[in-house]
Image: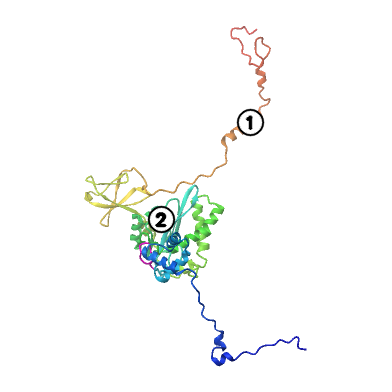
Amino acid sequence: MVSGCVSVAAPSTAGSATGGGGFDALVPSARTVEATTPAAVLDLAVKLKREAPGRTAAQVTEVIAAAEGWAPSARTIQRLFARLGLNTRPDGTPPEAFGRFEAAAPNDRWTGDALHGPPVDGHKAYLFAFIDDHSRALPGYRWGHSEDTVRLEAALRHGLGARGIPRSIYVDNGSAFVAAPLLRACAVLGIRLVHSRPGRPEGRGKIERFFRTVRDQFLVEVNARGVADLVEMNRLFSAWVETAYHRRAHSETGAAPLERFVTGGPFTIPTPAQLHEAFLWSEQRTVTKTATVSLHANTFEVDAALVGRRVECVFDPFDLTTIEIRYQGRAMGHGVALVIGRHTHPKARPDPASTPPTTGIDYLALLADRHAAELAEWSPPIGYSGLVETTEPGQCPDQLMIPDPESDGS
């Protein structure tokens, strides 16, 4: 029986004889893709770009659509420009290429910035944070109700005392980051302060990426549970940073930030005296003929030998009642307070006071309950109906009986 047999054709050897068969014949031929966008449209796109180099691919697409009634996608035009080297910035210059940068070791470079957070206790909250460029660890951080120098210095001071002194700090040109107190603190501790060029955010990508993590992993939980005040906000954030973020492997380095940071130790930790000196504020004043200086509505008497000289007044911004006078870097004693008009620096504003918790005590209700209880204790209770008589002629019913003073009482 042959009904179940399958015939198999023998492989042809004709191709082998001519050299066009065998394994060579199995190699797929080169794929050719014909352009679906008309060449005339692509040429028009190139001419429009060269006519005005500031035009983007999206804008060129709009111009072609307006002129021809149809246009390819902006992505197609963008690829065309990239292939021809026509990608330029609005000023006509080619875009710069920035390589990825990473500090060589921990504490080589910290990057600082501020994050606008949610309202806390009725006031908007801001997070000042510094990230170590090498390890991605977070040395210093603090939530506050103001985006100012005081809150910035609080975050930096926390980082310096816990993680050591970095070689440089990289920040933007926000008002808090260019303020004189920060410049002085860095100068005292020997830290190189670097500001990014206006309009050039390159180099702050790591802190921005961290802020995105804060929004996705911390703030989402804060919004779900709520926080009472800044004290609780900072407590919860510190717990999240130290137990979650610092101990989880980073997607770029492959290591936990805190683990990668400590490999560069030991670090130089400033002494309490160094930190105190670094975060004092100072202002220049000229000593008057009466040997006094004025500082924010306060008047101090100084050494008479300094009359007419420019001196440095060093002080704690939260206590303007005491200042130290320095001349050309030399300590010249403390000023003697003559007039004290204010006790704190105008820019040293504390965070708004938290709303005090309610006690739930209703004082008037307590008094009402006490009064009701006292009335219930009377035995017999007062009968106001006994004060009423209705038998006197001419007396209206249920009125109080008022005796006539001229009657004899009979």
Front one among 325 and 124: 124
Q: Residue furthest right?
A: 1
Count of residue discs: 2
Front one among 66 and 370: 66
Query: How far across and how far down the image is residue 227, in percent?
Result: 53, 51
- Quadrant assignment for the N terminus: bottom right
The mark closer to the camera, 1 or 2, is 2
In the picture, measured across the screen, residue 91 lies left or right of residue 243, that is left
Query: How far across and how far down the image is residue 50, in percent?
Result: 37, 66
Which stretch appears magenta? Answer: 89-96
In the picture, measured across the screen, residue 210 lies left or right of residue 225, that is left
Query: How far across and how far down the image is residue 272, in percent?
Result: 39, 59
Three-letter code for the amino acid on which mark 2 is drawn: Leu
Front one among 232 and 109: 109
In the picture, measured across the screen, residue 135 lies left or right of residue 28, that is left
Dominant secondary structure of the residues highlighted in magenta in the image:
loop
- Quadrant assignment for the C terminus: top right
Residue at 61% from the left image edge and 11% from the top image edge = 403
Q: Which mark is residue 246?
A: none
Magenta span contains residue 314: no
Q: Which mark is residue 152?
A: 2
What element does badge 2 sit on? helix
* Residue linked to disc 1: 372
Three-letter code for the amino acid on which mark 1 is drawn: Ala
